[in-house]
Image (cartoon, helix red, strand yellow):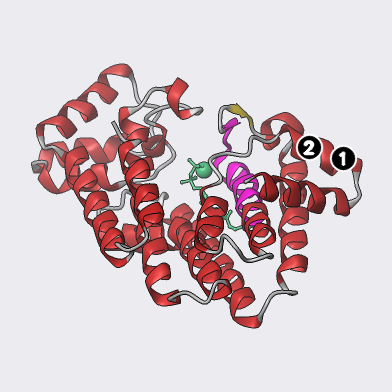
Amino acid sequence: MKRVEQEIARLIKEIDYDEVTALYSTLSGGKRLRAKLILKIAPDHKDAPLLAAIVELIHGASLLHDDVIDDAMTRRGVTSVNASSGSKVAVMLGDILYSKAFTELVAFDKDVAQTIAASVTALSKGEMMDVKMAENFNSDEALYLDMLYLKTATLIEAAAKASALLAAKDAHKHALYGRNLGLSFQIIDDILDITATEEVLGKPAMNDFIEGKCTLPYIYLYEKLNAEDKKYLVSLHTKETTKDETLWIKEKMKEYKTVEKSFELAQKLSNEAKTAMSEDSELVAILETMIKRTF
Ligand code: FPP
Ligand code: MG
């Protein structure tokens, strides 16, 4: 991973603007899941650290824009750039990181470059769907999973597929692995929003529903509730909920085991990825660590 951090530092330096270097240094790197995946799949390829750096810059850019869109005050436990330096700066920093990443990406083989580039269109489409869907209470599970795939899983799928292409490994199998890893990763994230504390999350807890996001535990809860309670749940959508209202949601979720049901889907997707990649114990281990971070 040291090589990836060095590549990221080199690309940031090449942008040749002190303002950008200073701002970038205030960001927390995060889990670097996508970069780790690329290095695991193509460990011996000389361009793997660069590809990993490119994908992390794209991911970083998307989070800068997402925090503007979501009005988020914190990211990965530190003040977000939009909160510390304003939305204009956050958008422009995102643009710079994103275009620098693409400048580097075009030097790769066409199939690798196309894989990553196409996933960014999907990512942006997914973000727009997410924002549109948050305007009303959504109880459509399939639509939610489509959006989740686009918003979160595509870049992970593309990272796995592109590195498999670099290493001349089975691109289809690795893409399936990345897709399911990404989906279950996001479902776990949605669960943690409900079950974890603010300190653990690095952002306010139970915030998804306030932002309008009807994640799987909410969709499954809606399915189970009687007509009156359905109406009550919908009335809480996008509201700054009181302690009692939050407690009501949590108790109903407990009663109908909707967090457990969401976890089962994450586990099913993760098991499919494990089966596809059973011969690669390191990739299986990544899935296991990811699933375990739940409770
Ligand atoms: C986080 O979702 C957001 C994403 C994973 C994708 C955001 C994508 C874009 C803004 C479009 C692409 C833009 C560029 C510049 C490449 P979340 O809000 O559910 O998660 P969070 O809790 O981590 O904020
Ligand atoms: Mg967000």
- Identified at 46% across, 55% down, the residue is 152
- Residue 140, label in figure: none
Foreground residue among 7 and 114: 7
Q: Residue at x 31, y 61 (%)?
A: 273
Mark 2 CB near ligand 1 (8 Å cut) = no
The segment highlighted magenta reads 58-75
Tell which residue pokes out farthest to the bottom in this image. Answer: 110
Are circles 1 and 2 on residues that touch, CB within 8 Å? Answer: yes
The image quadrant where one finds the C terminus is top left
Answer whether residue 62 is magenta in the image.
yes
183 and 68: which is toward the camera: 183
Residue topped by disc 1:
19
Residues at marks 1 and 2, CA–CA distance in whole angstroms: 6 Å
Mark 2 — residue?
Answer: 23
Residue 140 shows up from this direction: no
User: Magenta segment: does it hold 68?
Assistant: yes
* Other-residue count near label 2 (Cα within 10 Å), few / some / many at <14 / 14–19 / ≥20: some
- Kind of residue indicated by mark 1: Glu
Q: Looking at the image, which residue is at 21% across and 38% down? A: 259
The dominant secondary structure in magenta is helix
Quarter occupied by residue 276: bottom left
Q: Which amino acid does label 2 sit on?
A: Leu
Q: Which of 263/34 is in front?
A: 34
Residue 215 is situated, as x and y percent measured from the top left of the image, at 32, 46
User: In the orientation shown, which residue stands out farthest toward the top?
Assistant: 243
Residue for point 32% across, 45% down:
288
Q: Nearer the viewer, residue 243 or 65?
A: 65
- Where disc 2 sits, the SS reads helix
